[in-house]
């Protein structure tokens, strides 16, 4: 029977919103970015694994050689472009990649696979590099990060073998967030920075090349997200929170609104903070602190000036040793340090002598794998066994100090015997320069980085023998609390405001002052906003932080009373837990710094 009852019209189909997901990772570069995903994970190439006839062997070998030659040309060109864009030191990675493709033993093994196993050139090359990268991946974190270099070289050569070398990934129509399983250094350098809002990767650590480059670019980045490429696809909207080390996938309206507000707020704060750029870091009651910058690459000098730092409190010189197969010469280092000294003068530049080993293993030094590398052969310990490397660097610094205000900082000193041995080597360097008739600054100041508990306990005896102390909190906190700062599982135990940490820092500051030397701090704790007032109150003379942290730290100092800070520090030093200390500081700071995230 016909049913005349009016039927309801079907309503418009509603699209169910994708569920929001928050993925924790590692904060690699601060900042907040909201945008669409551009997935570089699609770059994984599919290679046909085929065997060839004997008659094809010469052709395949020739094809391999042509691909290698074209890749070397590409690397040379990209290296030149990168040198212009970000500086020669960061472009050295291209030279390392090129040299890898010139290694006769390395190439010989691939040719042998073509001849003996009848693999195609593509198959032989990919299998050999996959095996090499897998071997690196079984080693420690640093070697795993170097495996990214191998994959980078592999992709370049395979593109030529496949004949699709022109398919580059550095073209996007609008600014996007680059999402990748891993981000190789050469790809990072060749992407158009103007179109990149942020980076987010499954792999990577704080020492990976891509991480360091992201910081240098000033682009927000989060790494170590594990499964981000499985949770997103091209065009998805995500938020990269480089402050907290989070990525929000498919953010809901409330989250978007919250992050947009925070981003706008931080931008407004940054504009206001720019007014402080030329002002000194003085408290309201005229107590002066030196506020300097930590520098990873020489290309950050402009950032140092732009953010208002008064000098460089820590110049890490390891970049001179990475990306090259030979140690940097005295002349190369002299020219580099002279350039930096001239750019920063009259302000000081504190140059930390070579601090490799542990999680930093340059290719130009044979540093064997160790079961516990953070407590192993590293920093000044390598300098003592290879004094020619140390003396070469010291000679370069002493000479370059004719052009500015350089100071020498000795890392990982743990005893007076080690300190005296290092000072004796510095004297040897001066004597060598005298004999060679080279001009140098003999009165260059020398300091010790206090980053080993033993050095903290010996601070007064150390201060008697040097011109300054600089507290390196990254390692000092790690060693004091027995917490591996690279281990995500126990990251919550790494606590700058642990009462034991504060008491040790206070004792170092007092020890230095009793001997009439100033005491600075160059570890990440110096950039902890909650620690700033306490450090001022404990009498620290200098803070050195990343250039992007300088404006907010300067603001805190300039709005703080030294008298109030001393009282707050005295109270904090009586408390038994980090929780109580944080509550105390937050109670003091929140009414005074409502525009800061505390």
Image (cartoon, rainbow, N blue to C red):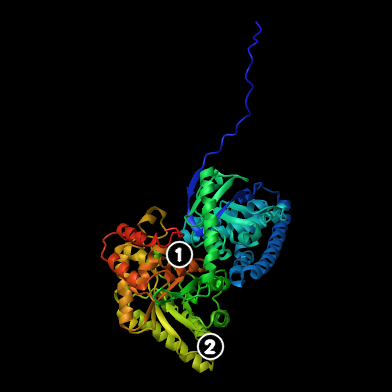
How many other residues sit within 10 Å of disc 1, few (<14), some (14-19) or many (≥20)?
some
Is 450 or 1 nearer to us in this picture? 1
Number of marks: 2
On-image quarter of the C terminus: bottom left
Secondary structure under badge 2? helix
Q: Position of residue 431 (x, y in %)?
A: 46, 91
How many other residues sit within 10 Å of disc 2, few (<14), some (14-19) or many (≥20)?
some
Q: Position of residue 296 (x, y in %)?
A: 52, 70
Q: Is residue 365 left or right of residue 515?
A: right
- Pointer 2 and pointer 1: residues touching (CB < 8 Å)? no
Residue 298 position by quadrant: bottom right
Q: Is residue 114 above or below residue 501?
A: above
Residue 231 position by quadrant: top right
Q: Position of residue 465 (x, y in %)?
A: 35, 84
Q: Is residue 88 left or right of residue 561?
A: right
Q: Is residue 567 left or right of residue 239?
A: left
On-image quarter of the N terminus: top right
Judged by depth in the image, the label closer to the viewer, 2 or 1, is: 2
Residue 109 position by quadrant: bottom right
Q: Which residue is mark 2?
A: 402
- What is the CA distance from the residue labelled 2 to the residue labelled 1? 33 Å
Is 506 or 332 nearer to us in this picture? 506
Q: Position of residue 147 (x, y in %)?
A: 54, 58
Whether residue 182 appears in this view of the structure is no
What residue is at 67 percent from the left and 51 percent from the top?
120
Residue 359 shows which numbered tag?
1
Is 377 or 525 nearer to us in this picture? 525
């Amino acid at each position: 029977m016909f049913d005349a009852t009016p039927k309801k019209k079907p309503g418009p189909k509603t699209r169910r919103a994708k569920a929001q997901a928050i993925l924790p990772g590692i904060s690699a570069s601060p900042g907040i970015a909201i945008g669409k995903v551009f997935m570089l994970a699609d770059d994984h190439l599919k290679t046909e694994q085929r065997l060839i006839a004997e008659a094809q062997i010469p052709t395949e070998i020739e094809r391999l050689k042509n691909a290698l030659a074209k890749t070397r040309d590409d690397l040379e060109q990209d290296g030149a472009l990168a040198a212009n864009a970000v500086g020669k030191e960061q472009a050295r990675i291209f030279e390392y990649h090129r040299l890898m493709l010139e290694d006769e033993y390395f190439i010989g093994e691939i040719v042998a696979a073509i001849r003996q196993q009848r693999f195609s050139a593509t198959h032989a090359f990919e299998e050999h590099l996959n095996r090499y990268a897998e071997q690196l991946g079984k080693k420690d974190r640093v070697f795993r990060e170097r495996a990214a270099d191998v994959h980078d070289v592999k992709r370049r050569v395979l593109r030529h073998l496949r004949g699709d070398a022109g398919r580059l990934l550095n073209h996007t129509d609008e600014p996007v967030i680059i999402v990748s399983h891993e981000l190789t250094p050469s790809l990072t350098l060749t992407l158009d920075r103007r179109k990149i809002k942020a980076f987010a990767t499954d792999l990577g650590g704080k020492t990976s090349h891509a991480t360091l480059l992201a910081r240098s670019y000033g682009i927000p980045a989060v790494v170590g997200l594990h499964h981000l490429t499985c949770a997103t696809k091209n065009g998805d909207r995500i938020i990269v929170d480089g402050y907290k080390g989070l990525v929000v996938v498919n953010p809901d309206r409330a989250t978007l609104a919250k992050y947009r507000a925070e981003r706008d707020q931080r931008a407004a704060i940054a504009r206001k903070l720019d007014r402080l750029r030329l002002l000194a870091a003085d408290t309201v009651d005229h107590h002066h602190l030196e506020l300097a910058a930590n520098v990873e690459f020489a290309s950050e000098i402009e950032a140092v000036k732009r953010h208002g730092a008064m000098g460089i409190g820590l110049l890490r010189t390891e970049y001179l040793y990475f990306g090259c197969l030979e140690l940097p010469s005295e002349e190369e280092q002299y020219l580099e340090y002279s350039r930096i000294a001239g750019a920063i003068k009259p302000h000081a530049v504190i140059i930390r002598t070579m601090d490799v080993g542990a999680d930093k293993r340059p290719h130009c030094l044979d540093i064997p794998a160790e079961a516990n590398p953070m407590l192993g052969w590293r920093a000044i310990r390598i300098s003592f066994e290879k004094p020619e490397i140390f003396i070469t660097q010291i000679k370069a610094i002493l000479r370059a100090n004719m052009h500015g205000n350089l100071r020498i900082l000795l890392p990982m000193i743990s005893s007076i015997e080690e300190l005296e041995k290092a000072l004796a080597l510095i004297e040897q360097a001066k004597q060598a320069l005298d004999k060679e008739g080279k001009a140098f600054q003999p009165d260059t100041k020398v300091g010790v980085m206090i980053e080993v508990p033993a050095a903290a306990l010996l601070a007064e005896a150390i201060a008697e023998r040097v011109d300054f102390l600089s507290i390196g909190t990254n390692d000092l906190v790690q060693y004091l609390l027995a917490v591996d700062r690279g281990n995500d599982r126990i990251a919550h135990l790494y606590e700058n405001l642990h009462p034991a940490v504060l008491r040790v820092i206070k004792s170092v500051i007092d020890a230095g002052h009793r001997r009439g030397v100033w005491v600075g701090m160059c570890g990440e704790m110096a950039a902890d906003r909650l620690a700033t007032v306490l450090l001022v109150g404990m009498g620290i003379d200098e803070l050195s932080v990343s250039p992007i942290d300088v404006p907010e730290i300067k603001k805190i100092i300039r709005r703080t009373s030294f008298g109030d800070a001393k009282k707050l520090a005295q109270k904090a030093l009586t408390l038994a837990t980090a929780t109580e200390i944080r509550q105390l500081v937050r109670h003091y700071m929140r009414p005074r710094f409502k525009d800061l995230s505390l």
